[in-house]
Amino acid sequence: MAVIVTGAAGFIGMHVAERLLARGESVVGVDSFNAYYDPTLKEARAARLVAHPAFRLVRLDIADAPALQDVFAEARADRVVHLAAQAGVRYSIEQPFAYEAANLKGHLSVLEACRRTAGLRHLVYASSSSVYGDRPLGDRGFAEADPVDAPVSLYAATKRAGELMSASYAHLYGIPQSGLRFFTVYGPWGRPDMAYYSFTDKLLAGQSIPVFGAGQMARDFTYVDDVVDGVLGVLDQPPPSREPRILNLGGNHPHGLLEMIQLLEAAVGVPARMELLPMQAGDVSSTYADISRIQALSGYAPKVPLAEGLRRFVAWRRGYGERLGRG
């Protein structure tokens, strides 16, 4: 049986698909290759996957429900990892309807395709730490049972809506589902719109970096290999029918933005010139994952500290990244 991975040409999707292939799975990857950021990077990720004989790529917008159902029927998959989405908090202010199409209609299309797939054992889908809203950084992580009724961006609202839609489909149709709230995933082959990526490019180019929130923000950075460990560990542990679950997937250790910049300076070997700016609309001040629930389920334990993860990213950016071009 195959595993369907939506968003397979995306950052996390490529890494998940590669790990599935490495353990002997057949993978059907679905991606629309939209132009939110340079599709050249997505094409390069996809090229790594299509070289594998057990991988098949389908270029498709998941919001096209009839076409997606055809893909599911042909694939005869028993598991789905749904990672396709319109990403970006700030972009949701500029292009709100992109989020309606991908994160609402697209998520619903996946749910509909799943309920029509006989023998489906598990749907694992991507949610986001942004659903927790803007909360102060306390002495414990954000827990899955904490309130999530005050999103501060449309992106966050659509990800929470996806969780609610999934809960209704689990109740109505018995689809075994796990939603994963990702916390600031970073690493090689990442998204150019992420701060660590854009900061690295600016450091390498000798440019100043814009630091929003006057550098007082904190994020629970999670290295992509650790995220893949978490995704596959959960995928292999489907919940009982009609019992959807939500799990945090993070590093369990928040880092201040200025600390991250210092670690990048060390990795790049260039001092940063910072332009301190106010907080941007839609941003949250901090994120911090309580990972006790996913640890109890699958034994998940993040292994890569931020300094090492950034070092690996910078090495990739100077290698593969130079070939792809900066920006």
Image (tube, rainbow, N blue to C red):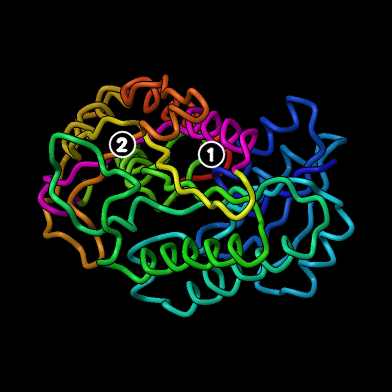
Magenta segment:
211-239
Mark closest to the chain's N terminus, 2 or 1: 1
Query: Is residue 74 on the magenta stretch?
Result: no
Q: Is residue 295 above or below residue 158?
A: above
* Three-letter amino acid code at the position of disc 1: Trp
Q: Quadrant of residue 21?
A: top right
Disc 1 secondary structure class? loop
> Mark 1 highlights which residue?
189
**Would residue 41 be seen by someone viewing this image from the given angle?**
no
**Looking at the figure, which quarter contains the N terminus?**
top right
Q: Between marks 2 and 1, how big is the CA–CA gap?
A: 26 Å
User: Is 250 situated left or right of 18 in this image?
Assistant: left
Instruction: Answer yes or no: is residue 209 visible.
Output: yes
Taking the spot 55% from the left edge, 45% from the top edge, the residue there is 11
| Corner quadrant of residue 187 | top left
Identify the element where label 2 is drawn.
loop
10 Å neighbourhood of mark 1: few (<14), some, or many (≥20)? many
Left or right of 136, for residue 268: right
Image coordinates for residue 4, horizontal then vertical, percent: 74, 49
Disc 2 designates what residue? 290
Examine the rendered structure and indicate whether residue 32 appears above or below residue 178: below
- Residue 278 as seen in the image, left or right of residue 297: left
At x 20%, y 57%, the residue is: 134
Which residue appears farthest toward the bottom when viewing the image? 97
Residue 149 pos. (x, y %): 28, 66
Q: Residue at x 37, y 76 (%)?
A: 94
- Considering depth in this image, is 7 or 23 the residue closer to the camera? 23
Residue nearer the viewer, 203 or 162: 162
